[in-house]
Image (spheres, grey):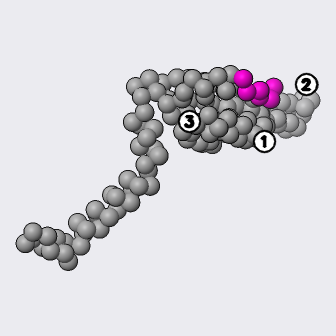
Amino acid sequence: MRHTRGCVQSPLVVLRYEITTYHFQKYEKEAAFFMASQVMRITLKAYDHQMVDQSAKKIIETVKKTGSQVSGPVPLPTKKEVVTILRAVHKYKDSREQFEQRTHKRLIDIIEPSQKTRDALTRLEMPAGVYIDIKMKNK
């Protein structure tokens, strides 16, 4: 137990203080996201997970070269769409075939992007199979 200003401080209070300072240091990057006045949110979608990862890597490299702060890529849940089709035309209902289509998603946040960052991202070339959604958030 510690003594501060003539009072006895319990170990629980000391532990709580150490935990909160640890969490503040750990989540300092996330705190910058919430304190930012402007955030550019980029969502990438594609059927091939390798194309999404390569595109996210390109975007992050470009943003870091321009000097802006980036958060991500955050992998979002994969959407799996399953379609069941009867193999036979008239009967044999038990004979079916299933097809699935998976949509992989990644989320990238750029904290307070500069004009240089925006220009670099507009000049960036992406593969044809990747859908890119860009939104600006003002706080």
Q: Decide whether residue 133 is among the magenta residues.
A: no
Q: Residues within 10 Å of mark 3 (few under 14, many from 20)?
A: some
The CA distance from mark 3 to mark 1 is 25 Å
Residue visible at 72% across and 23% down in the picture:
123
The rendered magenta stretch, by its main secondary structure, is classed as: loop
Which residue is at the front of the view, 50 or 64? 64
Counting residues from the start of the chain, the first of labels 2 and 3 encountered is 3
Residue visible at 83% across and 30% down in the picture:
85
Q: Which residue is mark 1?
A: 50
Counting residues from the start of the chain, the first of labels 1 and 2 encountered is 1
User: Where is 122 relative to 60, above or below?
Assistant: above
User: Where is 131 relative to 78, above or below?
Assistant: above
User: Where is 95 relative to 115, above or below?
Assistant: below
Q: Decide whether residue 126 is among the magenta residues.
A: yes
**Whole-percent x and y of residue 100?**
78, 36
The CA distance from mark 2 to mark 3 is 61 Å
Instruction: For residue 81, say whether it is visible.
Output: no
Q: Residues within 10 Å of mark 2 (few under 14, many from 20)?
A: few
The CA distance from mark 1 to mark 2 is 40 Å
Q: Which residue is mark 2?
A: 90
**Which region of the structure is painted magenta?**
123-128
**Figure quadrant of residue 35:** top left
Q: Can you tell which mark lies on residue 68?
A: 3
Residue visible at 91% across and 25% down in the picture:
90
**Whole-percent x and y of residue 134?**
60, 24
- Tag nearer the camera, 2 or 3: 3
**Whole-percent x and y of residue 2?**
19, 75
